[in-house]
Amino acid sequence: MPEIDEKISRKKTKCPGERPICSFCLRLDTACVYLPRGSMPTNGIGKKAVADARSSLWALRVGLILLQLLCILCSSFVHRSSANRQMELSPDATASVVEPMSESPERSMDGHVEARNVVQSPSQHCAFTLARPRPPVEVIEHFVEVYRTRIHLQPLPLFHLGRLADQLLAGPEFVLWSFLSLMLKISSHPYFKTQQHAAEDFYARSSEDTTMRLSSGGKPSLDVTRSLCLIAMKHIKSSQPAQAWMAIGIASRLYAMRTLFNKKHIPESADDAEARAYWSVFVLERLFLPYESELPATNIYKYPETAALPPPPLYPPTSASTSNTSDREMVDEPPGKDIGINGYSLRITSIWGKIRLYLHRLSQGEIEKPWLADSIHTKLGIELIEFEAQHSKHHLLLNVAFPNRSAAEIDQQREYWNPWMTTEILWHAAQAILNHPFLHLVVLRSQTDIPQSCVFLQQKVDMALYHVSWLFRILKLSEGSMTISNPILGDAIAACATVLWLFQFTRDEKVARRMCDNLDICENHLNTIGHLWPHISQKLVTFRKLRVLADQNRSQATHQETTINFKSEWLWDLLLPSMSETTHNVDLDSLEGLRTHETSNMRLKTHFVDRLPEASEADREQDYLDSLPPSIYSFPTNLDNMEHFNIDQLSRDLLENDLWGIFT
């Protein structure tokens, strides 16, 4: 029994191998045996140690995998999916997180949209780093709002606003980088803190590298086209016209290659995304350079989906608004005539681009006889008449009741009102510029073979005055309810300022005063648009030079005649689309020096007769004219009596009786 107990105790115990005396072996009266260094025991204890080490290694590997999964989960929490975002940022939750905002985003003095005041949220503790360039969804939503108020349909129809943030997050990164590189030129966000310049450089470089690499393959795609449009707008914002034109040219050539190598119909898509990309390139081609379009003339995409007509105004018209419009007109049109406000906006943008190209050719000395049937002037006039004839009456000023709309209504229905304003402004601007007195009395009248008809000149002067007056009346109606940031409209307003500048010298005090008031409206709008687009601020410099020169002209004017001294290059600077590589700061003190120096290199001598006589005299004159037989010499001075134009339909409504007599 003692021997058995001793064996059992030996199995339950283990020699610790203590040196120099082992208490365990001493108690059991056994001898300790130490193996040589490096040798393995033969009793199986070493194999168990190896197995334990392997188990520890596997546990370490599993721990590393779990750590990686935890990092991925943390990253996905910051960039959570749209489904989680909808659960976490429901309308009720958002209302409790975001402080109440005004009807329109607040803007700083430099025209940037201020970032929303977001109270603490998990993503707000993050900041931009090059190692983590993808911003959280709240930042994307902020920039989507900036895009909605500053870029969408002003001028680009590039994206559909519904779920745009989700589309950007789910799409290719280079499109998101292109979007952010443009938006950071316009606005900011606390997420970027002091790293905004680094973020701008990273997004611009990354997006352009990837986009140019993909486009160099010659295979057009929706994402590449979108990215090229955003890159072009970013270069325009940065006063880099060469880079912008290269991006626009690449997009145009990609569409041309699609037509050249794929003679089938244009690709069908579930929505109008492809059409929006195509027409965005179309608009960019006409933005700031007077050149022929490189887009193919065949396989033209349909117009993008358009917003429906807005409902009637929420509030009844006031006395001030009813004085600007007539009663709503009953519309009886064949079905299918109305192509939507986006279609009309793009059509008039196309005609406006042709007029800018025509002006460029005139500035280069390509003179023509404008009254000939095959002249470019006549063809452009016919296009404008056809546009007016095909334009649905549903969108006329008196039918949409624009003056009766509140700022909140217009902001909620920007999908309609942005292209509507583009249509109205470009329509009147095209008519005013095509009938510009400077063109017909100076540029085109320099021919020596056939003198121009007095009746022809009178028509041009009357039409120019009529349409430029309506253009600035609409701009005045928009003040306080709609902010215009479309650079194409900025170009149109600057060009029409030259018409105002000439008409302010008439001896008709009422008309001259109205022209001066319109010049103030013009300066305000150019100043607003110029804060966003530097090339418009350059036109503002020229515009202010002309205003200083106008004061000099008035100080030298005599009672018998009006002699206008001007620099023709200043007029051309406002008439032609232009963009320089550098921006200019407007210094009014430097403009004062124009008063003491000779500034004119041309003289335009104009004689205007007084405006139409008062009602009693007009009635007697009309009775006399009615008694005469029809004759070419009985040209009606009142536009109401013109038979070959229905002025009420052509220009939406009539101005007050401040029209012009015969121009001599």
Image: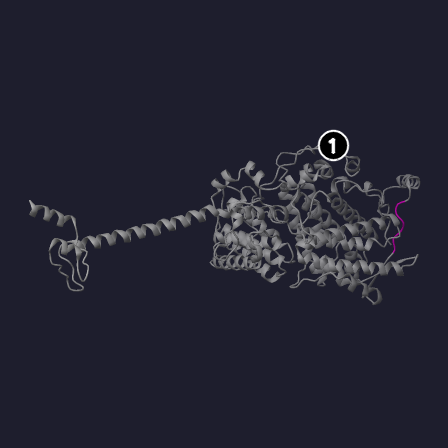
Is residue 101 shown left or right of residue 72? right
**Residue ID for mark 1:** 316
Is residue 460 shown left or right of residue 128? right
Q: Would you say residue 609 sits in the magenta stretch?
A: yes
Q: Secondary structure at mark 1?
A: loop
Inspect the image, locate mark 1, and give the three-letter code of the amino acid beneath it: Pro
Q: Residues within 10 Å of mark 1 (few under 14, many from 20)?
A: few
- The image quadrant of residue 291 is bottom right
Return the residue nearer the eye: 18 or 559: 18
Residue 344, above or below 287: above
Return the residue nearer the eye: 506 or 293: 506
Q: Main secondary structure of the magenta part?
A: loop
Residue 616, above or below 50: above
- The image quadrant of residue 424 is top right
The quadrant in which the C terminus is found is bottom right
Image x and y of residue 136, in percent: 51, 48
Q: Would you say residue 566 sits in the magenta stretch?
A: no
Image x and y of residue 419, in percent: 65, 44
Return the residue nearer the eye: 383 or 111: 111
- Which region is colored magenta? 607-612
Is residue 254 shown left or right of residue 293? left
